[in-house]
Image: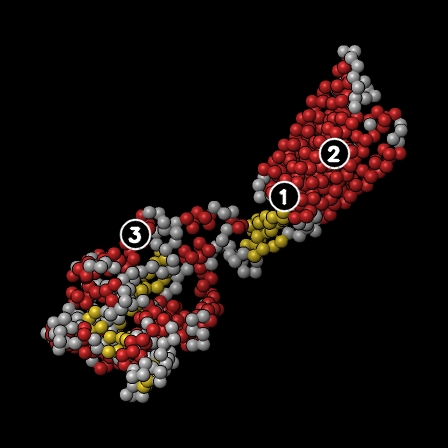
Amino acid sequence: MPEAWNGQKEKIAYAKQEGVIEPTTGSGGVGKYSWYIPRFTAIRDPKLTSYFGMTAGSEIENRRLMADTFLRPKTWQYFCDEVSLDNCTTPYYDDQGRLIAARPPSDESEKVQYFSADFYHGHFAATEDNDCDANPLTCNGHVANVQCDLSTFAIPQAHYLGIPVKGSGTGIAGGYPLARMVEIYNAANYTKSNVLFYWYTPDTTVQEFIGTDAEFQRVLLPPSTTKCTESRVTEEQRCSENPADRIGIEQGSCDAEAHSYQKLIVSNMYSNTYEVEESMRSPAYDAIKSIKLSDLELEEIFLRWYERNTDRWNYDAREAVCMWVGEHIDSLQSFVPHSHPRSFRVEEYKHPALYGAIIVAAICIILVVVVSVATFYYRKTKVIRYAQPIFLYLLLVGLLFLCIGATLLPAMPSQGTCIATQWFILLGYSLELVPLIVKVAALNTLHQHARKFKRVKLEFKKLYMTVGVIIAAVTIFLLIWTVMDPLSRQSNQKLTNDLNEDNGQIIAINYSCASDSPVWLACAYIYQFLLLVSSTVLAFQSRKVKQEFNESNSLVFVIYAHSVVLLLRIVLWLFRSSIQANYAMAITSYLLSMDIFLTL
């Protein structure tokens, strides 16, 4: 909240005690509630500019003075019903030829208005409260007072200073909403009726009438003191149904003190701001905390606002603020937090290392294709037949998938490339290792039975089904991952020491692939780790198998290479926040390509 007045000090103190808000700081301006009369009223009767003049006579004289001077404002509906002879069906002009009512009110909102430009210009009349002939000891004049939830002390001031005035608004103790208050003053200005007005500065309404005969003239009241301000009525008392509560005690009846209105900032704004990584941290908290505008600066903005008079309650206010900011930009820059304004620099995926990774991955694809063709060509040789061509083809397809994944990694991330990369890598490792594991496990079974001189029959259909089931399970996992929490392009922001043209720091933006939850990728790494553990166990068990069928040495080498690469990939993932994303992608691509070369 940018502006809190001292009339709410009990609520402010309670909010601070409960930890809802931070300790308050000044907004830069000084606020004050005062009694006012228009300048034309002060000219008519100068003694009304002071409470001394309002109370100079006897009680009966004072009551008649105030009752005769300050009549009560009347609504549009009242005027048409009680004053106009034809309910405002024809325009009504007063004795001086001023248009008072152009037409009757058109809806419920207009009925309660005290002023509407061009249609109803207000009317003030005496009521029973103003009739000092009938009620010499209770008659009083009218004071336009704000509603009780604002910082008003008008009731105890009037009561203890002996000023016989009372409000006639719809609020408790006769207060008016702010919009009605402005209408009453506009009506008084138009009809040149006397009005006693309880209002505050700084405000646009006060600014609007500077230099006119309706300029606000402050009424002198007893000066405020510490003892007086500590004895003020609280909001609960001001809004009480009991009149005795509303008048408070005499010590609290002095003039309202000028005070620095306060900024209220919720206590969790600091933690919510500073728990965010610095490159993504909003400067709003520091800016709100530091910015201040003086009364003169506010009044200058108000003056610009009202001078335009084109679209007062919409465009004019925005234009006034923008024009003022443009002219005072140098002084406002002192409120800009350190290292701001920041700018963004998107790191392009055009680094030579990225192109190199793509080229190396493309070479891998060519090598896999060449090896695949050679395998097919020599498929009937003994070494290929012993190695089982179908399993070799599956392994080569897996390596081809890894090559494609390594090619996609250095490219500019998009949701499509992010999803495809992980599919190719995980299926690639599965097609490479699962057939090898299944085949070696079958050879181990055959060797164990042979040592015991037992006959065993290997059914290739079951071996293929085992491979198919595992690959299908991996595919289902990838499908669930893609549907529930798909990989997508996410920005990684890093605050650099480079400065932009406004001396703010530059934030480097890199794009990488990630899901909302890291669990999915962790599961993928765990799965690959389990494949390597299974391969290690089987390689150890098959070390005594006949050499023509024994692939333990090759398997151990592949496992070693895969383990190193997997470990390095996990390290890159764990420290991804410290490594520029495009470089991390390039390194991963190189690692996969190296893994493929070693496997081939």
For discs 1 and 3, the disc positioned in front in the rendered view: 1
Distance between the alpha carbons at the discs numbered 1 and 2: 23 Å
Q: Quadrant of the C terminus?
A: top right
The residue under label 2 is 431
Relative image position of residue 408 (x, y in whole percent) = 71, 45
Q: Secondary structure at mark 1?
A: helix
Q: Taking the image as drawn, is residue 272 in sight?
A: yes
Relative image position of residue 50 (x, y in whole percent) = 19, 73
Q: Quadrant of the N terminus?
A: bottom left
Distance between the alpha carbons at the discs numbered 1 and 3: 52 Å
Relative image position of residue 172 (x, y in whole percent) = 25, 63
Specify the amino acid type for callout 2: Leu
State which tag comes first along the sequence, 1 or 3.
3
Task: Say above or below: 9 vs 386.
Answer: below
Relative image position of residue 369 (x, y in whole percent) = 82, 39
The residue under label 3 is 13
